[in-house]
Image: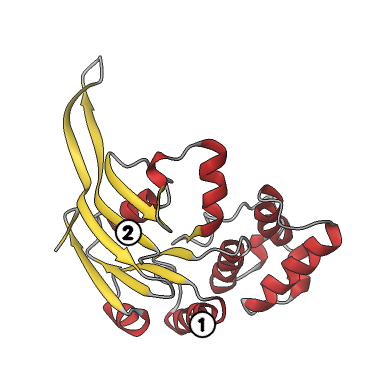
Amino acid sequence: MPLLEVRNLKVHFPVKHGVFSRVNAWVKAVDDVSLTVAPGETVGLVGESGCGKTTLGRAIIRLLEPTAGSVTFEGEDITTLEGAALRERRRRFQMIFQDPVGSLNPRMTVGQIIGEALDIHHLVADEQAREQRIGKLLKDVGLDPQHAQRYPHEFSGGQRQRIGIARALAVEPKLIVCDEPVSALDVSVQAQIINLLQDLQREHGLAYLFIAHDLAVVEHISHRVVVMYLGKVV
């Protein structure tokens, strides 16, 4: 049984004009897309800039509301969930964002950024367990546990992306949507992050929906590849 099954998913954005902001057209960013991801599998999602890859990824995890279609995760349609029920399921699917600078709150320490997820989902019993869990997550992504006291601006781009990966891992997800996680990094650092993602996949049994436009990266990490063009799977 697929871990994730997307069926006929659509995300349309209104185009408004005039004083009364009447809708006179729609942008079909994602138009009738279907795909599946099996447990422990990496599905590459490729296409040119603006084809709807990121919109699809965000709609799958409900950061954007789908216009139509269904997203079935572990046998349950998550497009019908709201409030506490959706928050509970969100433990099982997370996202690594393209921009490691913009996705981290500059006013929070690394420990606070990672610990926030632990607090929201009540995953640790006390402060000591929280610190130990944060330290282990930082070690798992190749950082020093003492870095928990630092702020994001004190790290390089590759290190910031490792922090983003640690935050995604904090809630023990089964699926991670990787939204071009290495496109903003130097080539040498890209290889390190890709190898880290593969190591974490083997260790934790993760499934990835890996969004990218670099075909060499996609070839290296993916089991299957889905190609999008103008909002459709081709």
Question: Residue 182: x and y, percent?
Answer: 43, 72
Q: Which of marks 2 and 1 is nearer the N terminus?
A: 2
Is the residue 195 above or below the residue 209 in the image?
A: below
Residue 146 position, x and y percent, is 78, 72
Amino acid at the residue labelled 2:
Glu
- Nearer the observer, 77 or 221: 77
Along the line of sight, which residue is nearer the eye, 22 or 176? 176
Does residue 51 appear in this view? no
Specify the quadrant of the image occupied by residue 18.
top left
Dot 2, crowdedness within 10 Å: few (<14), some or many (≥20)? many
Looking at the image, which residue is at 59% across and 72% down? 159
Which residue position is annotated with label 1? 202
Compared with residue 220, is residue 225 higher up or lower down, i.e. above or below?
above
Question: Which residue is drawn at the image coordinates 67% and 48% (left, top)?
Answer: 120
Q: In which quarter of the image is the N terminus?
A: bottom left
- Quadrant location of residue 127? bottom right
Label ID, residue 5:
2
Q: Nearer the viewer, mark 2 or mark 1?
A: 2
Question: Dividing the image into 4 quarters, which one contains the C terminus?
Answer: bottom left
Q: Where is residue 164 in the image (x, y as percent from the top left)?
A: 57, 64
In the rendered structure, which amino acid carries the disc numbered 1?
A: Arg
